[in-house]
Amino acid sequence: SQQGEEDPQALSIQEGENATMNCSYKTSINNLQWYRQNSGRGLVHLILIRSNEREKHSGRLRVTLDTSKKSSSLLITASRAADTASYFCASTLGGANSKLTFGKGITLSVRP
Amino acid sequence: GAVVSQHPSWVICKSGTSVKIECRSLDFQATTMFWYRQFPKQSLMLMATSNEGSKATYEQGVEKDKFLINHASLTLSTLTVTSAHPEDSSFYICSARDSRVGGNEQYFGPGTRLTVT
């Protein structure tokens, strides 16, 4: 089974609102990453948070990591229509050459 | 920096033919590249890990004789779908890890849409 499980699976919000997406994983991780994918396109790396970090910010993005609950959240503040995309969390289990294991993804729709 | 390209971006082929997809790291060297496939509205599934100068490591359930991977240089990996069938129609995405930088960040290509008729 996949390592990451995001929820909700689909989220629809109004432009300007905040969007919160959650991801849970099952085993210990080295780091967790969030990616965005526009329809039919490749993935864009958003942010990486290491297992010894609890929170990280990048522009309008805020990621938290709770290793005790094996969960992470991605918050997009002041959402824009251009944020409409699918968002995936992905984790590596450990070691410099560990592969990424992706969650199922969340479809975010931001209504203008 | 850290740009990965894929070629072609889309391809239509007839059942039974073979298709080669290229993945290139344009401004960095990548000893390790990864190949994923993605079905509509689904997540990425890792197919194989491509290592420069050695054999690829395939994930369970992925036929290595059907999905041939070659990583002949530090900037190029190719995936060949042999004897393609309609069920091989999918979105294939590669990623590359920068050899010079520690950590696990992968840079993704824009994907290749394969349609087998």
Image (tube, coloured by chain):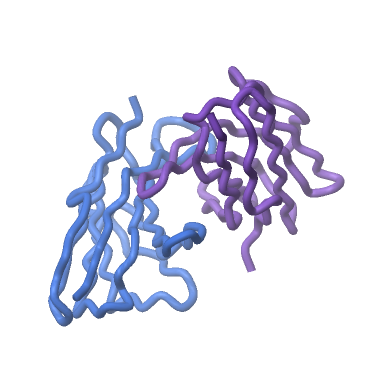
Chain colours: A purple, B blue
User: How many labels, in total?
Assistant: 0
Q: Residue at x 36, y 49 (%)?
A: A40
Position of A23 relative to B37 (above/below): above
Q: Residue at x 72, y 38 (%)?
A: A73
* Viewer-nearest residue: B30 or A2: A2
**Which image quadrant for residue A110?**
top right
Position of B48 relative to A14 (above/below): below
* Viewer-nearest residue: B111 or A31: B111
Position of A79 relative to A34 (above/below): above
* Viewer-nearest residue: A12 or B64: A12
Q: Residue at x 22, y 72 (%)?
A: B116
In this view, the residue farthest toward the top is: A59
Q: Is residue A41 left or right of residue A30?
A: left
Q: Residue A85's x, y, as percent?
A: 50, 41
Q: Quadrant of the N terminus of chain B?
A: top left
Q: Residue A13's x, y, as percent?
A: 64, 36
* Viewer-nearest residue: B66 or A108: A108
Q: Residue A74's x, y, as percent?
A: 67, 35
Q: Residue A25's x, y, as percent?
A: 72, 54
**Which image quadrant for residue B40?**
bottom left
Q: Quadrant of the C terminus of chain B?
A: bottom left
